[in-house]
Amino acid sequence: MHDPITIDPELVAEGRALLQQEGNLNWRWADLVARVMPPNSQDRGVVVAWAEEIGWLETGRTVTTLLSFRTTALAWPEDKRCSEASFTAHQELAAEPNRFAIIRPGMSKRQARVAAGKKPEIGSKDARGQVVADLLTDVRVLREFASNPQYAAVLREASVEVSDRMVDAAKEDRATRAPDLHRADEAYSVLAHLARARREVVSAVQRAAEVDLREGHVAEAQRRAEQIRDAADLALAFFAGRVDSASLESVLAEWILDDGEAKR
């Protein structure tokens, strides 16, 4: 038979008192367990006995949690802890040899996992954006993106989409807050599109003059120039008030349909 484990009554009293308190007590528990089972001790039974004495197990919590707290406390002497980083960040980095250099103020558990080279946890769909943001703060991840053309292409596409959505959201917000300014912006956008369309046509003709186009290319160029003329006639009719918005949408829908069939 094994001799009964003797627990320091003072540690039992401290544990029972701490169990009655509320709030973020992780570091206090960690330091207390490290006193129950000091460094270099291999007797986990003392933690089990202490947990039973103070009523820890009755709360539904486990001895494994206490042992994890102890590991964190031993890995992080008080003078090496970062008060502005979470306890779980310290916990994730506890086994890292260079943990004192990695930890930084405000570091979360996810950021610590990334810094430690671990796969980030995704607790819910809502957390995915934060996980990606944390990953993109890691220099090693960015280097991997830079060295892999496929990753880089995905990142560029995502960046463009995010930018477009931000622009659209800003436009909607401005349209609500300052409708007159929004209307002016849209008007200038219309004028810019028309000016750009004219420049594109002129540029295309100039390039055609520099190239010996084949008969088939000339025919296709004529067809597309006629489409541009039709579009310009439609624009003139609309601005002159001879075509209303409903008719305009109907014509545009037909053109889009025709373009789709032509591509097939």
Image: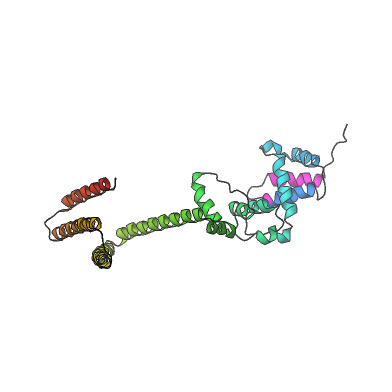
Q: Position of residue 191 (x, y in %)?
A: 24, 65
Prevalent SS, magenta region: helix
Q: Position of residue 256 (x, y in %)?
A: 24, 49
Q: How is the image coloured?
A: rainbow
In this rendered view, identify the residue nearer to me: 98 or 77.
98
Along the viewing direction, whichever of 9 and 46 lies nearer the viewer: 46
Is 155 placed left or right of 206 in the picture?
Answer: right
Q: Which residues are magenta?
A: 7-26
Q: Is residue 86 left or right of residue 193?
A: right
Q: Say above or below: 27 vs 47.
A: below
Identified at 47% across, 53% down, the residue is 154
Pinpoint residue 30: horizontal percent, then vertical percent: 72, 50
Q: Quadrant of the C terminus?
A: top left
Quarter residue 195 falls in: bottom left
Count of numbered circles on the image: 0
Quick one: 7 or 116, which is closer to the camera?
Answer: 116
Image quadrant containing the N terminus: top right
- Along the horizontal axis of the image, is 117 left or right of 78? left
List x then y, in percent, for residue 260: 27, 47
- Left or right of 9 on screen, residue 214: left
Q: Residue furthest left?
A: 242
Indicate whether 212 appears above or below 11.
below
Q: Is residue 13 part of the magenta span, yes or no?
A: yes
Residue 164 sits in which quadrant? bottom left
Q: Is residue 85 magenta?
A: no
Residue 1 vs 218, above or below: the answer is above
